[in-house]
Image (tube, rainbow, N blue to C red):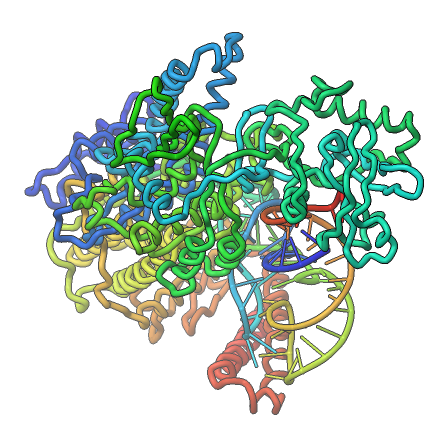
Amino acid sequence: MTRGSAAPVHKPIRDRDIGARTLAAVTENTQPGPESHGQHTATPADLPTQYAPAEVEGKLYERWVERGYFEADPKSGKPPYTIVIPPPNVTGSLHLGHAFQHTLMDALTRRKRMQGYEALWLPGMDHAGIATQNKVEQQLAEEGKSRQDLGREAFVERVWRWKEEYGGKILGQMRRLGDGVDWSRERFTMDEGLSRAVQTVFKKMYDDGLIYRAERIINWCPRCLTAISDIEVEYQEDDGELVQLKYGEGDKTVVVATTRAETMLGDTAVAVHPDDPRYQHLIGEQIRLPLTDRTIPVVADSHVDPEFGTGQVKVTPAHDPNDFEIGRRHDLPMVTVMDERGVITAPGPFEGLDRFEARSAIVAALREQGRVLEEKRPYRHSVGHCSRCKTTIEPRLSMQWWVKVAPLARAAGDAVREGRTKIHPADMSSRYFDWVDNMHDWTISRQLWWGHRIPVWYGPAGEVVCVGPGEEPPGGEAEGWHQDPDVLDTWFSSGLWPFSTLGWPDETPELEKFYATDVLVTGYDIIFFWVARMMMFGTYVRDEPPFHTIALTGLVRDEHGKKMSKSFGNVVDPLEWMDAYGSDALRFTLASGANPGTDVPIGEDWVKASRNFANKIWNATRFALMNGATVAGPLPDAGELAATDRWILSRLNEVLAEADGYYDDYQFAKLSDTLRHFAWDEVFDWYVELSKTTFAKGGRPAEVSRRVLGEVLDVTLRLLHPVVPFVTETLWTTLTGGESVVVADWPKDSGFRDAEAGREIATLQQAVTEVRRFRADQGLQPGQKVPAELALEGTPLVAHEDAIRQLLRLQPAGEGFQATASLPVAGATVALDLSGVIDVEAERKRLAKDLAAAEKELAQTSGKLGNEAFLAKAPDHVVDKIRTRRGSAEADIARLKEQLERLG
RNA sequence: GGGCGCAUAGCUCAGCGGUAGAGCGCUUGCCUUACAAGCAAGAUGUCACUGGUUCGAUCCCAGUUGUGCCCACCA
């Protein structure tokens, strides 16, 4: 393809429609045999000029899976590297947050695999008890049915069907993303093996006294009709009503405040602080409870804050956790006035009313009696809601199973304190400690149907007779035996995930080889729900924490840092962007935003930019192939290498070392930035541009350069592969003829460094940029050839004259050459004949500006160097640096003045 | 009510004692032997505010303001 200056002005832009040419065709056509060293550039014209990810990603992925690259062998002699996936809920599909974490996990395991580890990334899903049950109930509701209509067995069957459908969708998304997981080890928290793990742990804990049954106040969701744990309650500021109520008669009156007036039906005492002088006379007295026929005692309890309100508190032990404690201390009756749906059951006029209706009705009734002293409305206060359905939580007295957390949490905390598990970034560990050091007992029973049935059987009198597995449930229902109808909190089974997925309770080779896992990659938002619980179970069951490192990620947000949520309408389906720009583009964008522990904003423009980068890699490699870049044979000796070669190889090793550091430290944003900068700016712009001159000249230097370019691309593609697996696979196999970059060796630093070449190329870049700037300032067309004389003798630039001429469109000085502009750069001179072209005014302005900058620099540096305190206290390298800066400022000033003078 | 974090270019974010950085966006010119999804050149910042430590502060310390998140049984 030629592009002479004689070509028509409106030469048609290169046809960009490449629909007919598929990338797959290219990769197949160019699959080289071993004998084709340097030859698989044969059909460069067949290479499309744009990378079309959709054509190739799916096929590549299936090929990887078929070849078993992602399957891990427990009997292998290689050292293990293990990550278990945070199992996505089967409630729906993967969102960008999953795509983000999966990208990091995939990159980590891909790199380790290349480094020669037996890398296992274990996939699976979570049955997500309450969440999934709710989804299916919603579906049923649309059909006008309830789960009760179906009955337990049919309902559970229905949930399994849901799991098949949505689970399949999730697995498809993972393949699309390129997740290199071991599909042969896919697990589900309700699998038979995992269920056995759940039962086994339950029994062990029961036997150890760590699981018990107790009647207490729990968080009850009147819609889901189940108990939930403390962390499943979301508090938010709601508008309520605070009323002050007068109880009792005459001198035996008290004034209490409440936001939940309906609970007064269940009051069994009024409490005051034992030392409150105002109320000593009331302690022990009986007070009449309005709207009922009961009298209730006044008790003294130090929980009451005399400073707050009236210092008199109504006590409802069956409907408030604090009151429950007061009730226990004073042996008060527990009067339940509501059923599981929040409907009043206390006999009387309010019976059958919903709790909120009852609230207004009771306040109205009391108001009529003149017992409402003060009403604050609205009254903003914090109210708990069910995290699954947002219904207001009703504290409820109820018999539940509990985990005694203290000993487990202590061990989980110690594992981190002793450094057996590291939390990354380290400052996130305070969150973890806050939690494990203050955790209350955990309610694990749920009044749901979807989940692991509690493995406990009761006898006719309701006594626990058997805890499985390993014990035969004694009699049938006819004899009065029955299994506990409740299921376990979903986090109970996901807490076992790191070892239940590896075969525990059996001592499998997998468990032996892959436990404890290397790193947990997950969001900081589930430290309490999941991370802490895995740590507790891991240390308890295996006596070893489940991870060496916990790498916490932030949350994915939109391009303005706003939370993605359905109500904002800013939720993006990862598939949408993958379809438009390719999986690699999405992955690279997500990796670029991954600063440890901080949230990750992402916008479509950014994905587009990453797609451009993928395309750039594509085209640079395409250029290299067209010019015979090769990986065949050993690298030429340093003696044969040009300065450009030595520079780029030296940089390659530096970047490799840097990249390794970032991979090891989960610094994906820095990793991506470093690799993009190196590949695009240094390799694709400078090295490739310089190599054009070398290739044009031919001969041995061209051969050397071809080999070096092949080397640099080979290594760069391998370094990029864990993050952008698809484009690198396509190009790497084409370039090297290797089987797959997935199983290629991770590059190693050869130790080669050449700082001298680095300085030489820096000078060259500086010179070229300087002249380009001049050209741009002078309004010279980029393609316009300018006669020039180069005086480079005695400078590092001398070897690069041809390259400089090509990059700057300089042609040899012909007859009548007349230098009208002379640019001294790095001791050399580039004299240009710009007769009739040069804009003296523009040039003078440019020089004046530079001069001012140089003078400012001189003033600054001289000021510092004249400061004795500075000289005395600053470290030598800083002083030297400043001295150098002053030196070059002085030189610049002299040069600029001379140039200005010459302009007249 | 406690605790933690953040305030740097138009946007999203790095940097964290010694000349202010990136990506995107913006301006100008350009189809230049791969790439216009590109190339070249360029503009843009009282590094929130006020004090302090220091020869020197965007960086350390204190306070102020703004902002975000987590935890908590205040009737």
User: Is residue A851 placed above or below A142 in the rendered structure?
Assistant: below
Q: Quadrant of residue A339?
A: top right
At horizontal 36% and vertical 55% (from top left) the residue drawn is A549
Quadrant the C terminus of chain A occupies = bottom right
Above or below, A439 relative to A826: above
Q: Residue at x 16, y 46 (%)?
A: A509
Looking at the image, the residue that sits furthest to the top is: A144
Residue A421 drawn at (x, y percent): 37, 58
Q: Is residue A2 left or right of residue A884?
A: left
- Residue displayed at 23% across by 68% down: A751
Q: Is residue A447 visible?
A: yes
Give how far across and how far down residue A733 sits, in percent.
19, 40
Q: Can you see residue A179? A: no
Q: Is residue A413 left or right of residue A382?
A: left
Between residue A232 and residue A737, name the one nearer to us: A232
Residue A442 in the figure: left or right of residue A514? right
Q: Split into 4 quadrants, where in the image is the N terminus of chain A?
A: top left
Residue A294, image quadrant = top right
Return the x and y of residue A353 as percentages of the image width and height.
Answer: 72, 19
Relative to B4, is A564 above or below?
above
Residue at x 53% of width, y 80% of height: A882
User: In the image shown, does A665 or A727 lie closer to the viewer?
Assistant: A665
Residue B10 located left or right of residue A835: right
Give x and y (percent) for residue A696.
24, 50
Count the marks: 0
Indicate the quadrant where residue A92 lies. top left
